[in-house]
Amino acid sequence: MQPTVKPKNPNFSSGPCSKRPGYKVADLQLDTLGRSHRSALGKKALGLACSESARILGLPEGYRVAVVAGSDTGAMEMAMWSLLGPRGVDVLAWESFGSGWVTDIVKQLKLPNVNKLEAAYGDISDFSKVNFDHDVVFTWNGTTSGVKVPNGDWIPADRAGLAICDATSAVFAMELPWDKLDVITYSWQKVLGGEGAHGMLILSPRAVQRLESYTPPWPLPKLFRMTSGGKLTEGLFKGDTINTPSMLCVSDYLDALAWVERIGGVPATIARSEANLKVLSDFVAANDWISFLAKDPATRSNTSVCLTLKLGDEQVKKVVKLLEAEGVAYDIGAYKDAPAGIRIWCGATVESSDLQALMPWLSWAYQQVST
């Protein structure tokens, strides 16, 4: 029978993600609107976006945080174009965004000494083959495959190269070994349910040393330049952005950070995300027609949860459309490059009760399409 209880919030998109519980635009601090981002007021807000991120995440001493253009993609390309070149590169890929970094490194930067460690959707690269005498580029969480790095044990503390990590669907939802990562990027629109178009770039002291000692042989667009006269542009990491950000989006992000602190900090947001994954894990265990795309339970994402159904590709699309038409789940189709299936966001802004309400509807839609 068709279920009667619907999720109160049917937004399960993997980006932009659901806003935090209780979110209201009217609650935002809007005194920066219509003001220059270079005014004292604007710089204060942007500076807080950097300093509060560092404080709440518990970054090590000396790590720097900047607001940059182009969301997570912009932050990653800024890092790669500025830092890569003096060493060989190992690049890991097990889904479409990791594959995008392979393309940038091999076909755009055209670096000569590149070791590609690729894996199919559902699997993960072989960490034992990574050479940390090289710079290493990887995603912490494969947003389009639902496959995450289980821990940082494979990253040596005495690595010679830089560890450059796209962590856009992981920051605030997964424990990250900050001291083993030299570049970390993420976007506001993922775990915190912020707005798009802005990226966060975190640099370790080792990454800063690279920036100040190495000049790439290729031209750098203005948006990528982090040094002047061989020295780091420190203002960038205190809210003096390279280009004009949306101050409305900045206010929205500061609201999200305040929410994180109110509910208990990063441990609380991680716990919320893991509780959401458990709802789906219990459901998958009870139904043989649905499975995780991630084969190894240790690598299953607790944010971008990717699932396969015992249905044909067109039938899966019908399930997605049915759930949308009923107003119980929006934007849960698998990523365009991924195997046919569904992708349900389980980040911290999603309520477990909404996922619990969704599960009977998922069974109902499957039955409607398969019979």
Image (cartoon, rainbow, N blue to C red):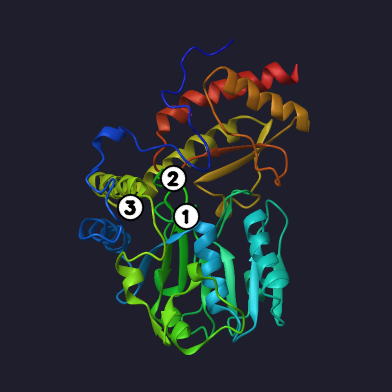
Q: In terms of secondary structure, where does tag 1 sit?
A: loop
Which of 111/295 is in front? Answer: 111
Q: Mark 1 and mark 3: span between their CA atoms?
A: 13 Å
Amino acid at circle 2? Glu
Which of 244/289 is in front? Answer: 244
Q: Mark 2 and mark 1: span between their CA atoms?
A: 12 Å
Q: Who comes first in sequence, dot 1 or dot 3? A: 1
Residue 170 image label: 1
Residue occupying the point 63% across, 20% down: 322
Which of 96/214 is in front? Answer: 214
Instruction: Tell me if residue 263 comes above or below residue 85 in the rendering.
Output: above
What residue is pinned by disc 2?
Answer: 274
Residue 267 image label: 3
Amino acid at circle 3? Pro
Where does residue 85 sit, x and y in percent of width and height?
Answer: 61, 82
Where does residue 230 sit, x and y in percent of width and height?
Answer: 43, 87
